[in-house]
Image: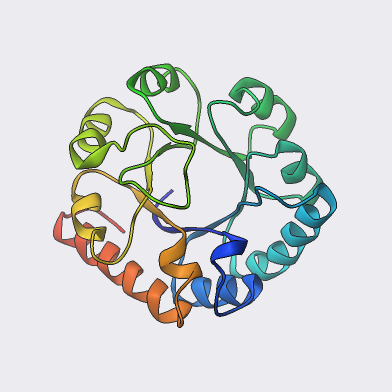
Amino acid sequence: MKGIYLVTDQMACTHHSLETIVLMAIQAGVSCVQLREKTADTRTFIQRALALKAILKPARVPLIINDRVDIALAAGADGVHIGQSDMPYPMARRILGPDALIGLSVETWADVVAAQDLDLDYIGVSPVFSTPTKTDTKDPWGLAGLARINDYSRHPLVAIGGLNADNTVPVVTAGADALAVVSAICSARDPFEAAQTLCTHFNHTRTSQGTPS
């Protein structure tokens, strides 16, 4: 898991439809899209997942479903992102199979240690900075916390929480393999330009570190 990882937020889509934002973002270089629907009913969630899958599949960009293993399975998504209060990882893996992409949020050091024994595709470091889009999380990790996790964990790290073009460089430098971005793209007047700027900052920082983008 590398690059800019778009996490959708229907409420943050202030200038364009969700489908338009996703299309513009992947055209700009976003490498993964997570569909997050905290308030939608199951039928609406599935419909939105299928609509995004139709956009993402031709571009070979994976679709990740937030929280809902049943939605991921029903929509034929590429994987699921689960939190500490969602379905346990072993059950999600058993249901979705060995090829599914599964990420897990870590909000405490105990979470990080427990994740070390799991065959995850990545861990989501949540939140790196405080953010209004996630109000049910622990205290922010900050750059020092992210760097500490990077030194310890065997998994790729997806940073999330308060990320934008202004803090991309220090977050990547601290050890993030991918940056999960919500409002910086979803609320932008020009989602293509916003996503392209994020991708450029990410790629330049990785290149300066001598790390493949």
Q: Is residue 48 left or right of residue 209?
A: right
Q: Position of residue 150 (x, y in %)?
A: 26, 34
Q: Is residue 112 above or below residue 194?
A: above
Answer with the quarter of the image where residue 81 lies: top right
The one nearer the camera, 49 or 40, is 40
In the rendered image, residue 70, in percent from the top left (x then y), is placed at: 77, 38
Q: Identify the residue at horizontal 34%, vertical 46% (top origin).
A: 130
At x 33% / y 21%, what residue is drawn? Answer: 109
Q: Position of residue 191 (x, y in %)?
A: 47, 77
- Name the residue located 28 percent from the left edge and 56 percent from the top edge: 212
In the drawing, does residue 123 fall left or right of residue 61?
left
User: In this picture, is 197 found above or below 149?
Assistant: below
Residue 190's place in the image compared with 144, above or below, is below
Position of the C terminus, as image quadrant, is bottom left
Looking at the image, residue 159 sits to the left or right of residue 206; the answer is right
Between 11 and 84, the one nearer to me in the picture: 11
Outermost residue, right side: 43
Please identify the quarter of the rendering in which residue 175 is found: top left
Q: Residue 25, image x and y in percent?
A: 50, 72
Quick check: 167 above or below 116?
Answer: below
Say which residue appears at 44% left-offset and 71% top-offset.
29
